[in-house]
Amino acid sequence: MFHRLLSVVRRQRNGRGWQKWSSVRSGAFVAEAHSVALPAEAHVVICGGGIMGTSVAYHLSKMGWKDIVLLEQGRLAAGSTRFCAGILSTARHLTIEQKMADYSNKLYHQLEQETGIQTGYIRTGSIFLAQTQDRLISLKRVNSRLNVIGIPSEIISPRKVAELHPLLNVHDLVGAMHVPEDAVVSSADVALALASAASQNGVQIYDRTSILHVMVRKGQVTGVETDKGQIQCQYFVNCAGQWAYELGLSNEEPVSIPLHACEHFYLLTRPLETPLQSNAPTIVDADGRIYIRNWQGGILSGGFEKNPKPIFTEGKNQLEIQNLQEDWDHFEPLLSSLLRRMPELEALEIVKLVNCPETFTPDMRCLMGESPSVQGYFVLAGMNSAGLSFGGGAGKYLAEWMVHGYPSENVWELDLKRFGALQSSRTFLRHRVMEVMPLLYDLKVPRWDFQTGRQLRTSPLYDRLDAQGARWMEKHGFERPKYFVPPDKDLLALEQSKTFYKPDWFDIVESEVKCCKEAVCVIDMSSFTKFEITSTGDQALEVLQYLFSNDLDVPVGHIVHTGMLNQGGGYENDCSIARLSKRSFFMISPTDQQVHCWAWLKKYMPEDSNLILEDVTWKYTALNLIGPRAVDVLSELSYAPMTPDHFPSLFCKEMSVGYANGIRVMSMTHTGEPGFMLYIPIEYALHVYNEVMSVGQKYGIRNAGYYALRSLRIEKFFAFWGQDLNTLTTPLECGRESRVKLDKGMDFIGRDALLSSEMRGIVQRVAGF
């Protein structure tokens, strides 16, 4: 059957249907730079004339910004946007992605009326198929999230699937999800419509103009150098798609934009004998790894194979993305899935197998926001084959970010600052995207971990803990223990257990939690972000008092739980700060806050040679000694009384542990349980760990992992930033009024918003269940 189809393809590969569908026309609103001089100055320069760049231009102009210039190195909408399959789907696993797609759907629906440009928008609905019960559970989870934010969807039976799309084979299905307001649209025409509307609002658009690099002075964007001359500007937006990585590295001060391209395949067929109706539902068969939509009465079908083909690792460039080479051998598993799902296609003629590059990121989420190293440099790229679905919403949020200083929704999960330079290795990106692309259709069970790009950042204790049965998770490139497998457990079975139900490791974590409550455990928490802020005078205290909501003018040796707030009073960061001396502070933050926190501090700290900010994350190994017997272990190792009378809660002191001096011991555990955090210079880490484990034997000590830590802190309702708290959550909404000192004698960021909130009254609260 496959060979018969292939022979048909070879006869039809030069058919005109594809050329007609993919043609790109530029409107009169586009100026060609060889005939019109570029402006010498602009407020904003946007790089990229695809759906992302035009969406940002559209929304910035709608919000009233002027002097916006959009530059495209080829023709408008002639890059990845031109080859997009045109499916607009709101069914996403992240709520912020669902909101972006929902906004895009509404925007594209009215765009034709607004601009007069036909976009091919047709509301078809989507049907997501489930061949297994686990897949059905996954769809039910997505369905519930869609319903919460007001997007119509429902779980339906295989019989209902057959009614909605009679050509489908439904004998192997256990159910499906129907999203009736999803649509198909011509992505290139959407980009042209957005560009037309932006142009009418004053945006200047120039094609065939390449940006060579972005000019930077003192960490601030000052302009761009193009092949047609310079443009001075205050803001630059990198919407260069798969070339965003290259463009970021070309700057005078490089910007890390971790993404990588893979080849993406889909086929186009001739019309069926009875042409498929234009409003036929789009089908997503994730278990078969394929999607299917109507195309001119025939079929457009592609998918995400298990063995993707990365491309352009060496940085090869091409102005307009030409159709890459067909590879029918590579596409054959997806074609087989298609024929199983729609057997009537067996004799259908195929017009073309399209091969086009798509960009993917290390965690399957797009990249959005301001660079941590260059102010005024914004990025919107890495859409993981969902550029059409996200384009409208992502452009809106980024425009809000630029105009107002922050978007209207919490977008931390998409923030560029969740990554650092460590995720920008070409080798890392090549290997990671080969894992990411298949994961788009893999089953999303809780607590799964990436397998590529591992062991990048490790604690000095990694080998020691690994030999004792540690199973690892990765956070911001750092290996962290999840739990420890006892010698009598089947290790392989535990690693392969992926389920929505009670996992095989549950009893192991339960025993670790019990030990933390009744005896003593050790958790390696070296991945936590650690900064030191010092000054020659009072500068350190003054700047921290302005940046943090709590009062940091405390006696030396005291620890303060506090947060960095934004202008709206929401949490930009949640941390603990120890006062080491009158002019020195030690700050501890979540692991994935390393880049974001550094950028926020640098943004507001004055240029003062007497004020020093240092990232000391790598200098210290952190051991969390949790449990009622922790005091006995530490007393015996230090020959110092560690009871609450001598070492009160939230106290910090440098002391000896075993033979090692200079250990920063803090009476807190991040869980609400009794115990101590030990911040150990890395050269002493192995010694201190061995001593703790040796002395602790008589007190029932054991290793524990982050799953136990999570269970403990949730029981005590210790909310964590990025999981429970975000940039829209204020301290007054999550029971942290005690961590805010409105009367500390000086202003701090977010104070006015909190005062206003107090006057209006709190209308929502974070609750633990």
Image: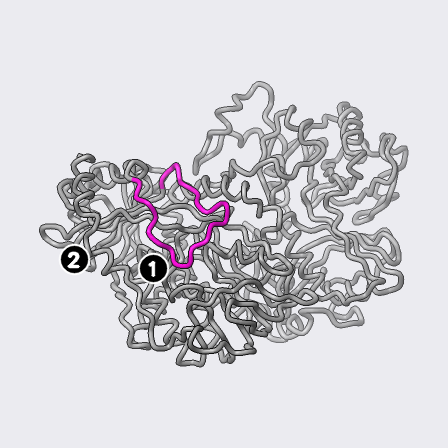
The residue located at (55%, 21%) in the rendering is: 489
Question: In the structure shown, which secondary structural element does the residue marked by tag 1 occupy?
Answer: helix
- Look at the magenta stretch and give its main secondary structure: loop
- Which of the 4 image quarters holds residue 465? top right
293 left or right, relative to 435: left
Q: Which residues are magenta?
A: 305-327
Residue 388 in view here = no
Going by the numbered disc 1, the residue's amino acid type is Arg
Q: Position of residue 173 (x, y in %)?
A: 25, 39
Residue picked out by circle 1 = 82
- Camera-side residue of 55 and 9: 9
Going by the numbered disc 2, the residue's amino acid type is Gln
Residue furthest left in the image: 273
Q: Is residue 318 magenta?
A: yes
- Closest to the camera, between mark 2 and mark 1, is 1
Q: Is residue 138 magenta?
A: no
- Camera-side residue of 196 and 121: 196
10 Å neighbourhood of mark 1: few (<14), some, or many (≥20)?
many
Q: Position of residue 412 (x, y in %)?
A: 55, 57
The residue located at (29%, 36%) in the rendering is: 329
10 Å neighbourhood of mark 2: few (<14), some, or many (≥20)?
some
The residue located at (47%, 50%) in the rendering is: 316
Q: Is residue 595 above or below residue 737?
A: above
Residue picked out by circle 2 = 277
Question: In the structure shown, which secondary structural element does the residue marked by tag 2 occupy?
Answer: loop
Rounded to the nearest angstrom, the CA distance separating label 2 from label 1 is 23 Å
